[in-house]
Image (cartoon, rainbow, N blue to C red):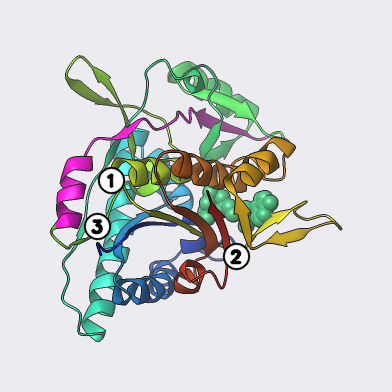
């Protein structure tokens, strides 16, 4: 029997947690815990492809670029995304190599700088929604809006930030080399931070300043490489109905139809749990066998069905 391919998505907020400063050591230690669990899956025979979020990390890189702009020319956001793939990919790659060595397992690990194709007429380009970078007062925001092509939006605390579009992923540009590397037995890290968004003009790829939701691009990656399992790991153990209310109910399993109904009923928060369920649904509708949402610290038990929330056909 062919070993199953599993795409595992690590949450950016779980790698750099809200109550942490975000130091090198903190991030490395969070990655280390997740990787130890993933190695258990490798021991069980799964072919593993790892992807990850980058929200807090790319935000920090973008702030560094903005603040140092007088000294070093700032890079556009797609370049910051590429840098974050290198940064987090390095953490995961090295921790994975160390954990494999500890277990006397000899499998090569590779990180791909990954571009993800989006449509140039995606409606998201008309309505940028993702806040990035430093906070500004109204005067600074107006000035920045005049000096650059940035779209600035006000939040509920009367602070202003740049917002960029979040288009839907269409396909993974590097999917063929990713598939080859999996077939060769490598552990692949790809499409980090949702991938670097690119559009196609004729035969040319062009990087754009946007951000793709990592849960949706993890699903796109899973479909493009014909994976059987999509495992989305985050900072919470299970999915709940009526989340954060007195009627809250944790879910162990749901069918595809139930998941779609719960989505319609609005049980999952926009920008956090909703894209995970949407990704899980789309994965099953496009050939996937199982979508699982679970905690970063319990990947192997989530795949065994003893923790997390599983969606099946
Ligand atoms: P990640 O970086 O892993 O993508 P997110 O913060 O985007 O993390 O998503 C995980 C968060 O989703 C949880 O911490 C939880 O607060 C939130 N959430 C929203 N709705 C639900 C729900 N119905 N069930 C469980 N968690 C939910
Ligand atoms: Mg998220």
Q: Residue at x 18, y 41 (%)?
A: 176
Which segment did they paint magenta?
A: 159-183
Q: Nearer the viewer, mark 3 or mark 2?
A: 3
Q: CA distance from mark 3 to mark 2?
A: 30 Å
- Residue 157 is tagged as none
Residue that carries the numbered disc 3 in the rendered image: 188
- 111 or 279, which is in the foreground? 279
Q: How many C-alpha atoms fall within 10 Å of the one at disc 3: few (<14), some, or many (≥20)? A: many
**Mark 3 residue CB less than 8 A from any atom of ligand 1:** no
Vertical side of 153 occupied by 249: above or below: below
- Residue 225 is tagged as 1
Q: Is residue 35 left or right of residue 159?
A: left
- 247 or 255, which is in the foreground? 255
* Residue 58 x, y percent position in the rendering: 41, 47
Q: Earlier in the sequence, mark 1 or mark 2?
A: 2
Q: Residue at x 14, y 50 (%)?
A: 180
Residue that carries the numbered disc 2 in the rendered image: 19
Res. 30 visible in picture: yes
SS under mark 3: strand
Q: Earlier in the sequence, mark 3 or mark 1?
A: 3
Asked where in the image residue 44 lies, by quadrant, the reply is bottom left
Q: Nearer the viewer, mark 3 or mark 1?
A: 1
> Does the segment drawn in magenta span residue 155?
no
SS under mark 1: loop
Q: How many C-alpha atoms fall within 10 Å of the one at disc 1: few (<14), some, or many (≥20)? A: some
Q: How many C-alpha atoms fall within 10 Å of the one at disc 2: few (<14), some, or many (≥20)? A: few
Q: Quadrant of the N terminus?
A: bottom left
- 260 or 109, which is in the foreground? 260
Residue farthest along the right direction in this orientation: 246
Q: Is residue 305 left or right of residue 69?
A: right
> Does the segment drawn in magenta span residue 165?
yes
């Amino acid at each position: 029997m062919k070993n199953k391919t599993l795409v595992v998505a690590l949450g950016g907020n779980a790698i750099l947690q809200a109550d942490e400063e975000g130091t090198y050591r903190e991030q490395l230690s969070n990655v280390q815990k997740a990787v130890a669990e993933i190695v258990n899956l490798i021991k069980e025979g799964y072919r593993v492809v790892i992807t990850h979020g980058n929200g807090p990390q790319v935000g920090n890189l973008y702030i560094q670029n903005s603040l140092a702009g007088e000294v070093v020319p700032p890079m556009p956001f797609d370049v910051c995304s590429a840098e974050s793939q290198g940064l987090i990919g390095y953490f995961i790659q090295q921790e994975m190599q160390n954990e494999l060595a500890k277990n006397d397992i000899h499998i090569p690990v590779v990180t791909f700088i990954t571009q993800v194709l989006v449509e140039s007429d995606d409606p998201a380009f008309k309505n940028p929604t993702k806040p990035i970078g430093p906070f500004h007062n109204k005067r600074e925001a107006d000035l920045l809006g005049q000096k650059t092509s940035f779209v600035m939006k006000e939040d509920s605390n009367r602070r202003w930030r740049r917002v960029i579009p979040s288009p839907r992923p269409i396909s993974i540009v590097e999917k063929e080399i990713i598939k080859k590397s999996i077939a060769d037995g490598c552990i692949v890290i790809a499409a980090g931070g949702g991938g670097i968004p690119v559009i196609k003009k004729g035969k040319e790829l062009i990087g754009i300043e946007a951000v793709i939701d990592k849960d949706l691009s993890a699903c796109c990656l899973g479909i493009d490489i014909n994976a059987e399992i999509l495992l989305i790991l985050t900072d919470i153990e299970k999915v709940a109905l009526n989340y954060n209310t007195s009627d809250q109910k944790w879910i162990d399993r749901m069918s595809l139809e139930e998941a779609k109904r719960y989505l319609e009923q609005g049980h999952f928060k926009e920008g956090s749990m909703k894209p995970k369920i949407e990704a899980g649904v789309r994965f099953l509708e496009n050939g996937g066998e199982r979508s699982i949402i679970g905690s970063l610290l319990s990947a192997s038990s989530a795949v065994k069905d003893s923790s997390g929330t599983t969606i099946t056909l």
